[in-house]
Amino acid sequence: MKFDDSLWKAILEDLFADFLRFFFSNADEIFDMKKGFEYLDKEMAQIAADAGPESPKYVDKLVKAYTREGNEQWVLVHVEVQGYTDPYFDERMFTYYYRIFDRYRQRITAIALLTGSDKRFHPTAYRSEFLGTSIHYQFNTYKVRNQSEEALQKSNNPFAFVILTALLSLQRSKLTEEALLEMKFGLARRLFSQQFSRAVIRGVFYFIQHYISFTNPENNTKFDSKIDSITQKSRHMGIIEMLKERETQKILKKGMAEGEAKGIEKGKAEGTAAAVRNLITKLGLSDAQAAEVAEVPVSLVKKVRASLKKKK
């Protein structure tokens, strides 16, 4: 679930302008997209600090967005991705609202993206009343489970592919591994047929690739092989290699950072081993493929794979 959270956070940043257009039909009239966005992750973490380490995990984003009103006017967009049933969710949304407002004194719009399977869970507002004093906080909600796959497929907004991915993930318990593989491949193939930018294609494909996982890791290799077959002769040639390089570099950098206290060379070694492990387990690469991407000897990959088998 932690990896899913990081995927949501990454795709929201990759596609935030399209995210706004997906939920607000007049987004380009309201927001000045050219000025970009400021992601207030540290500030949001402080606001949500009292959730505590034992609380269920969820994704929250706070984003500063400029409006087209002029004079550097801006608003705050609060996004919650909620994947489980929480009877106190509406209260948490209200708590975040008043804390954000107290800190910034700016207008706020909130969007709750509900990705869970519980059809009954669909909070839309927080209400409280006592002896003539009352509060009613309404927020935007979008329940993935209730969406029309046909309508989403007709959308020309790349964020629709993100929702289609989440929708397919909800259906996976009713599908065989073979059916899931074909549907995941079909979704990726439709993505490649769109006239989106290379950066958008890369971000959405990364989300599809990792958000929908297989019980049998061999299907990861099958999926990559099927994708390779349609990208080698298209304008997206090389995108798989770029994605694998992105994953490897991210892991190598993390290993270097964690290994600083132990010495640079040891940090490199630990980062490389971590990269190889993830190339094997998350991307399902063969020994030769993992060695090529991580730029290490095949013998090292074999050692890492052997160590993984011992842990099972």
Image (cartoon, grey):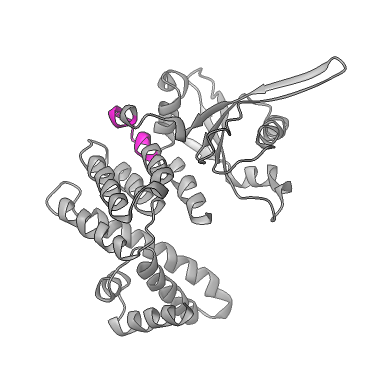
Q: Residue at x 48, y 51 (%)?
A: 4
Tell me the chief SS of the magenta region: helix
The answer to whether residue 191 is left or right of residue 87 is left
The residue at the far left in this view is 233
Q: Nearer the viewer, residue 42 or 301?
A: 301
- From the viewer's side, name the closer residue of 263 and 2: 2
Query: As displayed, is residue 307 above or below residue 11?
Result: below
175 left or right of 44 in image = left
Q: Is residue 136 above or below residue 157?
A: above
Observer-nearest of 101 and 184: 184
Asked where in the image residue 126 lies, by quadrant, the reply is top right
Number of numbered tags placed on the structure image: 0
In magenta segment, residue 218: no
Residue 141, how many percent across, how many down? 54, 28
Q: Is residue 158 above or below residue 10?
A: above
Residue 102 image offset from top left, x and y in percent: 73, 31
Near-viewer residue (220 or 121) = 121
Q: What residue occupies the far right of the structure in this picture? A: 131
Residue 160 forms part of the magenta stretch: yes
Image vertical order of residue 17 relative to residue 230, above or below: above
Seen at 26% across and 72% down, the residue is 292
Can you tell which quarter of the image residue 118 is in? top right
131 relative position to 115: left or right: right
- Residue 84 is drawn in which quadrant? top right
Q: Which residues are magenta?
A: 152-162
| Picture residue at 38% right of the left edge, 63% below the top | 282
Q: Position of residue 210 (x, y in %)?
A: 39, 54
* Furthest residue in direction top, as rendered: 132
Measured as percent of width and height from the top left, residue 164 is found at: 36, 38
